[in-house]
Image (tube, rainbow, N blue to C red):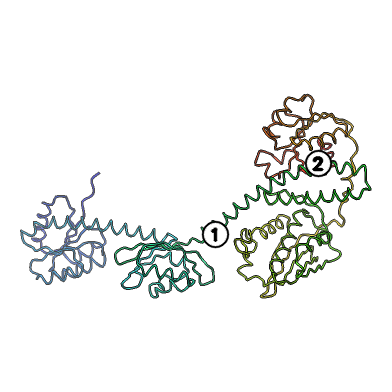
Amino acid sequence: MTSKPARLLYVDDAELDRELVRLALQEAPRPYELIEAGSRDDFVGKLSQDFSLVITDLNILGYSGLDVLQLVKREMPEVPVVILTGTGTEELAVQAMKMGATDYVIKNVRHMRRLPHTIDAILENEQLRRGQREAKQRLAEVVEAIDDCYWIYRFDQRKFDYVSPGFERILGLPVSLVYEQPHVLWQNLPAEDRQRLTDQFSSHLPGEMELSWTWPDGRVRKIRVRARRMEDRLVGILQDVTRLREAEISLGHSQKMEALGRLAGGVAHDLNNLLTVMLGYGLSLREQLPENEDLGEILQAVDRSSRLTSQLLTMSKRQLMQPKLLDLNSVLREMQGMFRRLIPADIELELQLCEPLPLVELDLGQWEQVVLNLVINAREAQPQGGRIRIATSYRDGWVCFEVADRGPGLAPALREKIFEPFFTTKGQQAGTGLGLATVYGIVAQSGGRIWVESPPREGSTFFVTFPASDQKEQPSEAPNIEAPPAAKRKPRVLVVEDNDSIRRLVVTLLRREGYEVVEAGNGEQALQSPSEEVELLVTDFSMPGMTGVELAEKLRPAKVLFTSGCSVSELEKRGFQADTASFLPKPFSPVQLREKVHSLLD
């Protein structure tokens, strides 16, 4: 594809001279489209058109070639101008060059022969310059769009030659300020960082460092400075790496908590297996020895241990909530002994409980976790002693719980971040930054609200509110102790459990109910057992070799009941579908097992 000929505008009122130019261009190595203007009006009328180059005589009727040059540079500043002169002096030609002319050619036969080559050279150079201008413009647009700041510093003049717009985005100061006051770059740095930056600029050596820059509004940003020497200049880049550093810290916390969570989840799983056996046989003995107080203490300890494992699972992987109606005052009274063990003697504990207090619907284990986190937080705020006030109240349909301390309080900037994950005021080695974030998540999931008030030097008060329940009394839990009526029809049940103690417990309880029970220690044994007319498969989810889900898919019984010491969310990652399958979490009581089996079979 051939390019269009370059358009040239030739301004001259002498026909003979115009003919001379025409003849000269006929000898040009490439074609040109020559547009002629023989008068002032003709020239002005053609200024709106596009031209690659303008040729003008220095002396034209009613006009000066310098006037033509000024008009062209005003209307078409990027278009090169060649001056033709036959009578003008060399000084006049030099003046034209100073005013912006690209070149000049003397009107005689010898020099006019050079005109095409002069035009070719000018247009080639202009094309190169145009490409450079466009590249420079694109580069400037890219630099302005980038969040980083690029800069050039002159050693000899001790000032910045160039600073990109990213300066204002990173440091919060106008770019013009650093041109006028180069030292402004040092003013918002701590003393140590200020000295490091001074050494960098004084040494004139390449390098990289990270600084802490304080914004005018008080925010602290992490800034990376990279520099490289180029002759008498230092060229460098500023980068805001605050989010990167925060992400690295959060990742470190996350990895630590992930490792702790896996450990806690494994411990809780094993504890749940043991507690299932203890709870099952303990409740069976209670039916036989209902007045035995020692047995009651054992069962209470098992119940508290069960709640502890639930908290461990909550830390490791999200635990499903099991809300029930609670009297917050009763729960707080039961926890007083734990408060006394957590709080040192130099901290006074005060309970202000509103009576009567409406019931609220909460998960007991998670609510206790909220209370303990807030009490421990109040304790840590008073290392030299003080007072912790725990209070309840009721207003406008909301039950309110408060924990107040007499510590130094929280600055506004800290209050804004206090519930953010991984944020801690205790330092990276002392706190995980998950305590209050966990509290916030539990409260929000329970339909409540939480906030903190902290007047200067008056301590902090955390407020937690929940909607009050319409029910006036807690449902009796007595039916959980007594066995329901025996089922009329006793189908065959296949029990698969790799823990021998739990398997024996489940088999014993179901046989007491009159069910025909077949047992197996793992999936392979279950596939070899007589499975005809098995109406219910009771299987542990996590077993060596074959999971409960895989076993159920191969046996395809009428009904399946999964048991596990893991949380439901952890099981869902392994293929468990909580919305369609029946699940009995460990530890479970004999009553819970019987009720679950009855609900599935009867």
Residues at circles 1 and 2 in contact by the CB criterion of under 8 Å: no
Q: Which residue is mark 1?
A: 246
Measured as percent of width and height from the top left, residue 377 is found at 70, 64
Measured as percent of width and height from the top left, residue 357 is found at 84, 63
Measured as percent of width and height from the top left, residue 13 is found at 13, 64
Residue 414 left/right relative to 565: left
Q: CA distance from mark 1 to mark 2?
A: 46 Å
Tag 2: amino acid? Val
Q: How many marks?
A: 2
Q: Secondary structure at mark 1?
A: helix
Outermost residue toward the right in this view: 291
Q: Nearer the viewer, residue 506 or 277?
A: 277
Tell me if residue 63 can be seen: no
Q: Nearer the viewer, residue 49 or 327?
A: 327
Q: Secondary structure at mark 2?
A: helix
Q: Is residue 179 above or below residue 110?
A: below
Q: Nearer the viewer, mark 1 or mark 2?
A: 2
Circle on res. 277: 2
Tag 1: amino acid? Glu
The residue at the point 69 percent across, 68 percent down is: 381
Measured as percent of width and height from the top left, residue 397 is found at 79, 62
Residue 515 left/right relative to 197: right
The residue at the point 23 percent across, 48 percent down is: 3
The residue at the point 16 percent across, 50 percent down is: 30
Q: Nearer the viewer, residue 259 or 153?
A: 259
Q: Which quadrant is the N terminus positioned in?
A: top left
Q: Quadrant of residue 327?
A: bottom right
